[in-house]
Image (cartoon, rainbow, N blue to C red):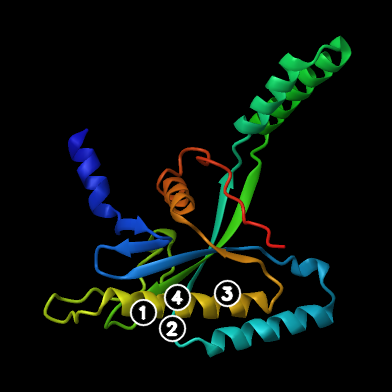
Amino acid sequence: MKNESQSTQQLVEIQEIKNGVVFLKGGGLRKVLMTSGINMDLKSDEEQAAITYIYQNFLNSLDFSVQFVIHSRKINIEGYLNILRERHEQENNELLKNQISEYIEFIRSFVEANAVMSKNFFVVVPYDPTIIPTGGGKLFDFFKFGKKESSSQKQEESAEKKFVQLNQRTEEIINGLSQLGLRVVALNDEELIELFYNLYNPQTIEKKDLKIAHNG
């Protein structure tokens, strides 16, 4: 068991998570943004063209790589069922109590027979000191934006400069996506830990229900 744990830790690129920033073992920093989506099928041809044009200009304006990740996962309904069970215990009306019980069984059976999936959209904003990021494709290349460099090639940068650069990039991404009418929020430490738990445990349902915050 100890060897399995050590092997898993060696595969994970993350050094630590602090103040909403993912610190990588190679010295790079990452911010993870969660964004809402757009259903293009509900848009007119003119609206689709306008959205595509704005999005294209946004991408062309960037002088650094970003990664867009779509994460689909089976929904965890246990929290919802627990609320229903509590309501069932508190209900004094026998008719309503039976209806709640039948509804709980219906929801449980339906989800068991039909996988109900949630879909979340993320943007990974990188900052790698002294290297030019090139982007990644696979889900578990989530943080590998550039080639690894030898220790002799590394140039020390102050922590303050790294954070300034990362925050500037993050603001640029948020502003660009907001022009598309998307809601964008940066994940905090707890939300990042939840996200990575889900990513590295694909055989299980999600740890919690990660949702984008609504502003205003």
CA distance for labels 1 and 2: 7 Å
Mark before the other along the chain sequence, 3 or 2: 2
Amino acid at the residue labelled 4: Asn
Q: Say above or below: 147 vs 140.
A: below
Residue 133: mark in rendering: 1
Label 1 Cα crowd, 10 Å radius (few <14 / some 14-19 / many 20+): some
Callout 4: SS: helix
Label 2 Cα crowd, 10 Å radius (few <14 / some 14-19 / many 20+): some
Name which residue lies at 63% across and 34% down: 77
Residue 174: mark in rendering: 3
Name which residue lies at 36% across and 56% down: 17
Mark before the other along the chain sequence, 3 or 1: 1
Label 3 Cα crowd, 10 Å radius (few <14 / some 14-19 / many 20+): many
Q: Position of residue 118 (x, y in %)?
A: 63, 48
Label 4 Cα crowd, 10 Å radius (few <14 / some 14-19 / many 20+): some
Amino acid at the residue labelled 1: Pro
Residue assigned mark 4: 167
Mark before the other along the chain sequence, 3 or 4: 4
Q: Point out the image quarter for the C terminus.
A: bottom right
Q: How many numbered discs sit on the rendered protein?
A: 4
CA distance for labels 3 and 1: 19 Å
Contact flag, marks 1 and 2 (Cβ < 8 Å)? yes
Badge nearest the viewer, 4 or 2: 4
Contact flag, marks 3 and 2 (Cβ < 8 Å)? no
Residue assigned mark 2: 64
Mark before the other along the chain sequence, 1 or 2: 2
